Image (spheres, grey):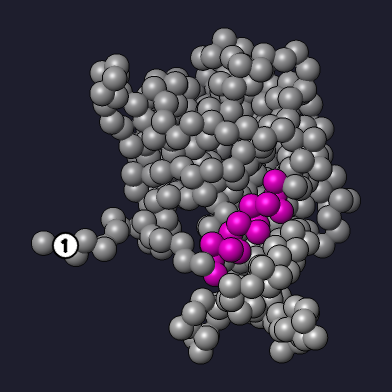
Amino acid sequence: MSSAWLLPEHVCDVLPAEARRIEEIRRTLLDVARGYGCELVMPPLLEHLESLLTGTGRELGLKTFKLVDQLSGRTLGVRADTTPQVARIDAHLLNRDGVTRLCYCGPVLHTRPSGLRATREPLQFGAEVYGHAGLEADLEVLELALDALQRVGVEGLVVDLGDARVLRGVLAGSGADDECAAALHSALAAKDAPTLAEHARALPQGTRDALHAMLRLYGGDEVIAAARRELPQRPQVTAALDDLAWLAKHLRLAFPQLQVGFDLADLGGYAYYSGARFAIYAGATSDALARGGRYDEVGAIFGRTRPAVGFSMDLKEVAALASQHAMPAAVRAPWADDMALRAAVRRLREQGEVVVCVLPGHEHEGQEFACDRELVAQAGEWVLRAL
């Protein structure tokens, strides 16, 4: 029999110090998104399963917890990703004609962790731009993600750029069905050359060569030049490479210290991406801190196929890499049945101060807050004194 206080695997409590850091980061990132003109939305944690999963691919379906609604008898899902919900809000509820910028922050739940130390309950922050098909929106979303991470003190940022159209262009006319394309997608994402060769064996030789070339196409600007030589000269592939070069150029202008690279086989994440996509890493981390890109078809099931681009990140992972901030100073106050003292405490709190009242019998206990002042009685008044 398990202990009552044990939590499920890869689920944990967030204790005060870490919770404070996560909340500070959440507020900062929402402020950064608002500075870009994003409006905050709060989708529900539960939705009908078909609404959550339609058009998002098998991977998201495997990550989604399912349950039966006792009111309707229908199958519900606990969201594993917020993007399909925000697409529904844009397409069905807001239904605007022009550009719409939306942001969100809330928990998602995964049936399995993404890694050995990963949580199954990320706190997902993201921002999305709807209604503009040009690269200007892709660049804006990338800059927002980078600004947000820099604002909270994450250092050593590296951006890897890729494009979903490269694989589609390589497979065009090859006879690969949806099942084969999905298997090739997974093999490329895992950089698994033997599995890639196994699933590609029935494809034309030129297609097989291009697929194996994609495994090697990662690094700096030389990747774009090599891709132009080694991949098929098809409109989808050419457009993708041109867009990636444009994005890299403008990112370097905006962030001179940023390391920008390319990985044409990085197809991690969800299958709804339709164009340029990116992953942001910090320092020597092996897992992406943020992922995003273009997903123009994500709102089609809700009645509107409209340009869309965005990103998301887990604030718990961000908090582990963000710079440490000293705990805000606080005021210690005695407890007494003294209206003047209680009025002084209220005034300080109204002014934004943290005031920790020492309850009777606990005068010698340590404080969790960094109290650098205390309220003391002097000449009939309660005044602040440095500790």
Q: Which residue is mark 1?
A: 2
- Residue 223 showing in the rendered view: no
**Residue 24 within the segment the image draws in magenta:** yes
**In the image: residue 304, left or right of residue 79:** right
- Front residue (pair 272, 355): 355
SS assignment for the magenta stretch, majority: helix
* Total count of labels: 1
Amino acid bearing label 1 = Ser
Residue sitting at x 65%, y 44%? 278
The boundaries of the magenta stretch are 17-30
Q: Name above or below for residue 21 compared with residue 170.
A: below
Q: Extreme right residue here?
A: 253
Q: Residue furthest top?
A: 303
Residue at image coords 53%, 58%: 316
User: Going by the image, does 353 lie left or right of 367?
Assistant: right
Write the residue at 35% across / 57% down.
10
Query: Residue at (65%, 57%) from the top-left corner?
Result: 25
Q: Indicate the position of residue 333 as horizontal and vertical percent values.
A: 64, 77
Q: Nearer the viewer, residue 339 or 30?
A: 339
Q: Give the x, y percent position of residue 94.
A: 66, 17
- Whether residue 366 appears in this view of the structure is yes
Q: Is residue 343 left or right of residue 119?
A: right
**Residue 99 place in picture, x, y as percent:** 77, 22
Rendered position, 222 above or below 357:
above
Q: 10 Å neighbourhood of mark 1: few (<14), some, or many (≥20)?
A: few
Question: Compared to 355, does 235 lie above or below?
Answer: above
Q: Is residue 324 magenta?
A: no
Q: Residue furthest left?
A: 1
Q: If the image is split into quadrants, where does the N terminus sit?
A: bottom left
Quadrant housing the C terminus: bottom right
